[in-house]
Image: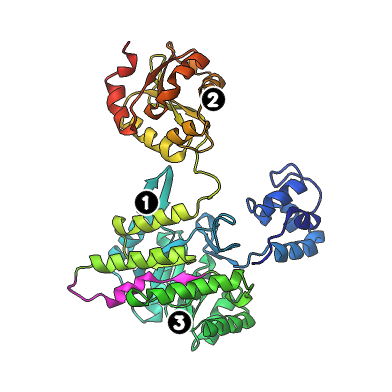
């Protein structure tokens, strides 16, 4: 595996001015954060602004370049970065740049249907543990086989959305026409093959656009294609080794795994690029008149397998909620930090128009616990204070068992956030799972503890009936 640079290797290549423009106290602090991969090189403004640091910047870029290069698709705030991977396993270092999901649109759709599908792609969202799960980009497919129609549709797409765009055609003339029309949006071109590399590669190099190298069935051919495109001047490349569904899924998974292992363990530069998978290919086997559910399910299974096996960009067709929830859930969980639990900030939260008579509850700062409790309080429609105790991201039961949720910690949190100044009572509703420390909490805090429901689903009824007020 490629050796990741440490702070002492990075620090000599920084300006050494301790200007704090990066937000860190000094250059050594910035070097440490870079070694931990929690800040980006571009945050060091002097390196990019002042010509005298040009050589240092060049050396630093080479030093910190990940084994799998990062490729940016699109421009502005909606641009998506894919790749940029440093390790094979997430327990070595958390993954960065989550897999991007692009949904297809045929270029020959009627104007109204075309606009409606764009809106549906942008509007697809689901709130999960306090975050909005969403899709990432749009893949324009050249179904018309007409360069003019394809270019017109690409231009129309830029008027309808600011999202990243992928131009999909194996016809070089079509890609050239669309690329000329929307080059300023930095679309991803799909794709250069062993037969079309010269024409498509020239278009990508001319406009400095990212390009997919497509060579199904042979990683040797894929490497050769990449080498040829690099010699042509194409800098940003994404690899597509082919996506086979059903009986061929095992072969596909093996190809994607070999690519990533070769890039990271063997430092193979020709395969050190992001990968693209096309589970949308499941629809090629779909026959008219057949129920689409099995095809959609096959698309989901293929996508899920390849998210786990290093696909950085995935092209899908289905927009159903039930098909995209599994893949977005999987991505969300895979790209969290395995060392650090998903947590929210501790503090005092207010729901509704709280006043001095409002009930006061407490919970932990484990994200799943917090957002479940938050949802149940909101559904109850009762104005409520919620004290969020810092348990280092542990759930109530685990935090009590692990002594991360103690009577003293609850008392300190009540004092820190001056909760007693907010209400005219000193009654605190404890999670049911923390009942065993209720007596200790009363002694440590001076508050009367009322044990609430063991399951948060009972919070609504508990608050609505005012049981916490009962003697």
Earlier residue among tags 1 and 2: 1
Query: Which label sits in the foreground, 3 or 2?
Result: 2
Residue 285 on the magenta segment: yes
Is 410 situated left or right of 322 in this image?
right
Going 53% across and 74% down the picture, which residue do you hit?
259
Neighbours of disc 1 within 10 Å: few (<14), some (14-19), many (20+): some
Residue to which mark 3 is pinned:
216
Magenta region: which residues?
275-290
CA separation, marks 1 and 2?
37 Å
Residue to which mark 1 is pinned:
125
Asked whether 17 or 365 is in front, the reply is 365
CA separation, marks 3 and 1?
33 Å
Name the image colouring: rainbow
The quadrant holding residue 152 is bottom left
Earlier residue among tags 3 and 1: 1
Going 55% across and 70% down the picture, which residue do you hit?
260
Residue to which mark 2 is pinned:
409
- Where is residue 378 drawn, in percent x and y? 34, 31
Q: Report helix, strand or loop for mark 3.
A: loop
Query: Which label sits in the foreground, 1 or 2?
Result: 2
């Amino acid at each position: 595996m490629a050796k990741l640079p440490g702070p002492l290797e990075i620090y000599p290549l920084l300006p050494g001015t301790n200007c704090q423009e990066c937000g860190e106290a000094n250059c050594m602090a910035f070097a440490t954060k870079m070694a931990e991969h929690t800040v980006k090189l571009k945050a060091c403004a002097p390196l990019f602004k002042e010509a005298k640091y040009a050589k240092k910047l060049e050396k630093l870029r080479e030093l910190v370049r990940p084994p799998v290069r990062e490729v940016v698709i699109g421009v502005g705030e909606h641009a998506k970065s894919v790749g940029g991977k440093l390790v094979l396993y997430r327990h070595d270092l958390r993954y960065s740049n989550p897999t991007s999901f692009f949904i297809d649109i045929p270029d020959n759709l009627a104007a109204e249907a075309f606009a409606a599908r764009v809106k549906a792609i942008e509007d697809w969202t689901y709130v999960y543990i306090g975050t909005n799960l969403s899709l990432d980009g749009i893949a324009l497919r050249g179904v018309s086989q007409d360069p003019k129609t394809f270019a017109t549709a690409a231009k129309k797409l830029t008027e309808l959305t600011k999202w990243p765009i992928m131009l999909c055609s194996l016809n070089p003339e079509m890609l050239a026409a669309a690329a000329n029309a929307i080059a300023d949006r930095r679309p991803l071109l799909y794709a250069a093959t062993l037969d079309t590399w010269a024409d498509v590669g020239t278009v990508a190099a001319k406009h400095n656009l990212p390009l997919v190298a497509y060579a199904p069935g042979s990683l040797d051919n894929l490497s050769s294609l990449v080498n040829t495109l690099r010699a042509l001047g194409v800098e940003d490349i994404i690899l597509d080794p082919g996506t086979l569904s059903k009986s061929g899924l095992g072969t596909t998974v093996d190809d994607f795994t070999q690519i990533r292992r070769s890039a990271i363990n063997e430092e193979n530069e020709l395969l050190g690029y992001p990968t693209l998978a096309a589970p949308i290919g499941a629809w090629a086997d779909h026959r008219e008149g057949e129920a689409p559910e099995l095809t959609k399910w096959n698309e989901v299974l293929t996508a899920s397998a390849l998210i786990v096996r290093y696909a950085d960009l995935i092209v899908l067709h289905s927009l159903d909620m039930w098909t995209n929830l599994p893949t977005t859930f999987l991505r969300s969980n895979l790209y969290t930090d395995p060392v650090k639990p998903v947590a929210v900030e501790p503090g005092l939260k207010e729901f509704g128009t709280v006043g001095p008579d409002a009930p006061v509850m407490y919970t932990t700062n484990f994200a799943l616990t917090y957002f479940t409790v938050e949802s149940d309080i909101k559904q109850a429609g009762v104005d409520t204070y919620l004290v969020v105790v810092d348990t280092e991201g542990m759930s109530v039961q685990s935090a009590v068992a692990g002594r991360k949720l103690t009577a003293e910690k609850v008392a300190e949190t009540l004092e820190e956030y001056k909760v007693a100044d907010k209400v005219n009572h000193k009654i605190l509703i404890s999670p049911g799972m923390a009942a065993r420390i209720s007596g200790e909490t009363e002694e440590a805090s001076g508050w009367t503890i009322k044990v609430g429901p063991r399951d948060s689903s009972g919070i609504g009824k508990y608050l609505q009936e005012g049981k916490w007020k009962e003697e």
